[in-house]
Structure formats: C-alpha cells, structure tokens
Image (tube, helix red, strand yellow):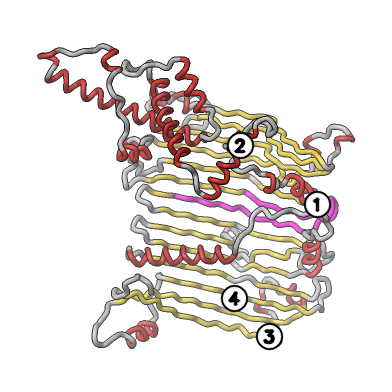
Amino acid sequence: RRIIENLQLEIEDVHLAVKGCDIAAGVVLKSLRLSTTDNDGNVKFVDRQATHDAFLHKELLISGFGIYLQEDMTSEGTTNLEDNQYVLSPLSFEAKFRESDVAKCIEYPKYLIHSKLQSLSIKLSRTQLELSHRLASVVTPSTKIRPLFPEYRPLVPVSENAQEWWNYAFRCVGRLNRRRSWMEFYLAFQKRKKYLQLYKRHAYSEETSWLNGLNEFELSDLRRIEGDRSVGISGLMLWRSIADSEYEKEKQRREESSIVKRSILSNIFGSSTSKEKECDDIPITLSADELSELEGFTLDADQRLTEDSKYCDITFVLGSFQVHLLKSEHEPISSLDMGMVSTSFKANADGSYNFALSMLSLEASDRVTKNSFYPMVCRGLQDVNNTKKHAVHFETNKSSKGDQEVKFTMIAFETVASPLLIQAVKNFFDFSSLTATIPPILEVNADDLSDTLTDAIMDAWNGKNKQKQKWTLDMDVKAPILIVPENCTKSDALTLICNFGRFKVAYGTALPSPMVLDWFKSRQSSEKAIKFDVDHLKMEMNDLSLIISSIGEVAENRHYLSKIDVSKSVIRPLSFTVNIGIEQTEATPDDTP
C-alpha cells in the first residue's frame, strides 16, 4: 500500500508533431507531475501506517500544454517552439486531491478535489482553419477498409493460407447473422475452464500445499490462451478475477474444515498432513450466488461510508476564457472574453448532492467595423455598484428523499447585430471555396434525440409522482436586449431595439393561484370526492418592448434605456402573468397528470 500511495509520475518536454501536405501540427507539454504530498502540500514520501494519518494527499501539476497549427517551415530550418502559431496557447493546470480512510465523514468529505485553470486562450486565423480542414480530410479514417472482427483476422498472407482466411470469413458471417455454431461456444467454455485451473495453479502453487505447479506443457497452454487474439484483455482480466475469488473461497473453506476436524476427530483418528492426499481433493468452484458477489469483491465492509457521511467535494475554477478570430495575423475579426467560471459538486453518502455553476462576465468585441458606436457587440449590464455579481448562476440540489430544487439567474446582456461583423464571421467559416471534404464524424438524428429526451422527462415525472417527491424551480432571467442597427457608424441610422424584459418562472415555490384551485374544484365529481394535489407553475414577463430609434440616441443612453423616446415604439412596455396548475390525483392509476 505504501508503494502505491507514493507512486509519482513526472513527464517533461513532450512534443508530438504531425507533418505532411505542407502542414505542421503538434502538441507540446512542458511538464506534468503527479506526486504525493503531506498536509502542507510539500512533495515527500509518506508512510501513513507509521504516522497514523487518515488522509492521502495527491497533487497534479500541468505546465505548458498547447496545440499549434501552421504551414510547414521545415525547409527554412528548425523553428523554435515559441515561434509556433498556437491555436491553444500553452496553459497551466493544477489539481489537489485528498482521500480519507475514515468510514464516518461528517465534517469533511471522503474525497476532496480542488482544481484550477488560470486561463484558456484560443487564437484561430482563417489560414489555420483552412489547414485544419485540409488535415482533417487527410487523416480521417475511412470506414470502407476497416476489417470485420479483427480478433479473428489471420496474420498470414492469403495466398499460402487460404483455409484460415475461409474460416475467418465463415466466422464473420456467423457473427453478422447471429448464427454462431454450438461448437464455438463449447470450445470457448472449455478454454475458460482450462484457463481458470491453470491460472490458479500458476499463481498460488507456491503459497499453498494443495495446488501443484505447472509443468512445461501446461505453462505453454497457459501462455497460448493468454496470447489468443479471440480472447480480449477484458475477458482475461475477468477470468483472473474469477480464479482469484475461487482461490479465496477454497482457502476459506479448507481452513474452516481443518478446524472442525481437529476439534472432533483429531484426538481419535489423528490427522494427515501429507501434500499428496490434499492434492487429490476435488477443487472447489464458485456457485452462481458467489459469482454475483464478485461485483463487490474489491469493496471491504470497513470502507463503506455511513449514511450521514459526506462523499465528495469537487470544485473547478477557470480564471478566464478567450477566443480570438483573425482574418490574417494583423487583421482581427472579433474576440470573446469570458470572466471567471467556477463550478462545484458536493455529494453525500445518502444520495443527496449540490451542483453549482457561475460565470462572472461575458464580452464580445467588433474589430471589423471602424469607428463603430458599438465596439462591444455583447456585454453584460451589471450593476455599476456591484461588479462582483455573477452574470450567470445555475444551482441544483437533491435531497436524500429525491426532492430536487433548481435555481437559475442571469443578468441582462446587450447584444448588437453589427452587419459588417456578421458578414465577416460568415466569410470566416465559409468552406465553399475549398475542394477537400470531410466525411461526417457524428450524425445525430433529431427525431431519436427528441424521443429520448421525451422518454427521460416522462420517466422522471412518473418517478416523482410514485415516490411523492417534490420539485421546485426558481428562474429569474433578465432577457437579452437585442439591438439591430442599419449600420454602426452613422448616428442617424435607424435602430431596432428588442428588449425582452424580465422573465420569471416559479414552480413549487409559491402557493397555487386561487383561480386555478377554484377551476379544479368546480370540475371535481360531486358523487365521489377524490383527493388531489395541484402543482403550481407561475410565469411572469415584465417590460417587454420593441422600439425604433436612431443609433446615436441609443448609444448615448445605452446605460439608461428608459430615457429613450418611446413615441416610436412598435410595442409599448407590457407585462403579463400566466398561472398553470397540474393536477395529480390519487385515483390516477398510471401516475400521469
């Protein structure tokens, strides 16, 4: 255990490059270090059995990981890595892990993981995009030449081994038609049975007196089965796990049997300890019930957490995220700048958990339109006095009983549809002029996805009703303000302002509307009273408006849109509320509303 806990991994100066078709692409890594630390974070050898420390500390540090893509300059000499045109700028990542050996973790979690990525920067030019398109069209594997069932495919030429290749074709057809011969199943069964006995004798013959070691022929059979390409690695590992478990059970039964014999019969008849007699005993194999216990074989009883324990606490922080699009090296198109993003996941042994995701800010700039009234085409309208408030926050909680709570808040974002920027981005991702085509890597069927999502929602809803769980939803979204200008450079250009106001959704957090309850009661059967529950959903839309103005007036009052002249409003600010009731009665047999 001390050796495993103190294993360290250090990798330095890694450079993987792919060159061809006048393209040079690669991945660089300055260093990667995975090490064991003490409580203070110092790298050292830790003997927890001697110090009686209940915590295991690990640290992962990654430095200088980046991806570059450029034209091949090999003919001009070897270039420095710092001169490469990076798509993903070299980044640094750190993570700290702590594990507790205590079976009752009330004040701290069993697993604690804190990770941080300082910055993530992507810089992509039109030239790099074309090179990536050309590279993908070359290296994308073709499905036409992929062999069927390579584990059966012979490794010898066809011309001199026609019989083996005909056998391979016969097995492939059987697998495709699902008509495999019983002889094939029987041979696989015999192979498994033989391997279990050989592996047990080979692995434990030196530890026990009732297992003989393997001779040369039997060892050759063991190696032959392990080298059989029709038996995968996962299959061999499963067989070894079964053999190890059978050995432990057989050892346990022999110890129990020896105790009984010594206590009752040894004084009368004596006992035999000869190895020859014990070797003649029939090996003990696992029953079906004992095989089912193999799934939990690696989890000891003292390692299971109590129901009131904390299981894990995982946090991840991304300092900043940037994306830069360039037409050429000195012609930027746009840039996206995202503030700090933090996420956390906390789970308990009783099944309850908390998940949270927050984003501090989001901005996008227009680098194409010169002298634009809107150099920032996307920005969050945070309160000037509260700049630390998150622009987006999502949180979900689940209790041990299955009750779930979802909260979502978002500030208003001002988004400008700059005509020149939209055209530049469209031209940036236009591949119509390129002759190379990329075969589809992933095809998604919209109908199948919709059906899967619908089935998942219905299953969750039915499960909620059966188990009498409670769902709550609290969503407060300041909808985006969309500005569509005629152009962004003339002050008298007409501008359409679509202010989607503020959208609120509350489910399970407020009392049902009296009008909704009266509606359900009025339609209740008078002959037989049925108890029913009503889930209440309330949706509010406030200050929805559509205004036509000049870009100069809008830009001047962009922080105070309420000062804009609304005499030319297409839609005056309006608000509305919708109350929805979903009835769930006890008389409903299928638990549907």
Specify whether residue 103 is painted magenta: no
- Pointer 3 and pointer 1: residues touching (CB < 8 Å)? no
Q: Which tag, 4 or 3, sits closer to the chain's start?
A: 4
> What's the residue type where badge 2 is placed?
Arg
- Pointer 2 and pointer 4: residues touching (CB < 8 Å)? no
Give me the C-alpha separation between circle 3 and circle 1. Answer: 45 Å
| Picture coordinates of residue 505, whole percent (x, y) | 49, 72
Determine which residue is flagged by label 1.
Answer: 130
Magenta stretch: give its range: 319-346
Above or below residue 441? Residue 25 is: above
**Residue nearest the viewer, comparing 251 with 337:** 251
Q: Which residue corresponds to the image point at 27% horizontal and 26% vertical from the top-left? A: 252
- Pointer 4 and pointer 3: residues touching (CB < 8 Å)? no
- Pointer 1 and pointer 2: residues touching (CB < 8 Å)? no
| Picture coordinates of residue 531, whole percent (x, y) | 27, 77
Determine which residue is flagged by label 2.
Answer: 153
Give me the C-alpha separation between circle 4 and circle 1. Answer: 41 Å
Crowd rating for badge 3 (residues with CA inside 10 Å; few <14, some 14–19, many 20+): some
> What's the residue type where badge 1 is placed?
Glu
Determine which residue is flagged by label 3.
Answer: 569
Q: Which residue corresponds to the image point at 77% horizontal and 62% vertical from the top-left? A: 425
Determine which residue is flagged by label 4.
Answer: 501
Above or below residue 62? Residue 265 is: above
The image quarter in which residue 117 lies: top right
Element type at marker 2? Answer: loop
| Picture coordinates of residue 404, whole percent (x, y) | 41, 61
Q: Which tag, 2 or 4, sits closer to the chain's start?
A: 2
Q: Which tag, 1 or 2, sits closer to the chain's start?
A: 1
Element type at marker 1? Answer: helix
> What's the residue type where badge 4 is placed?
Gly
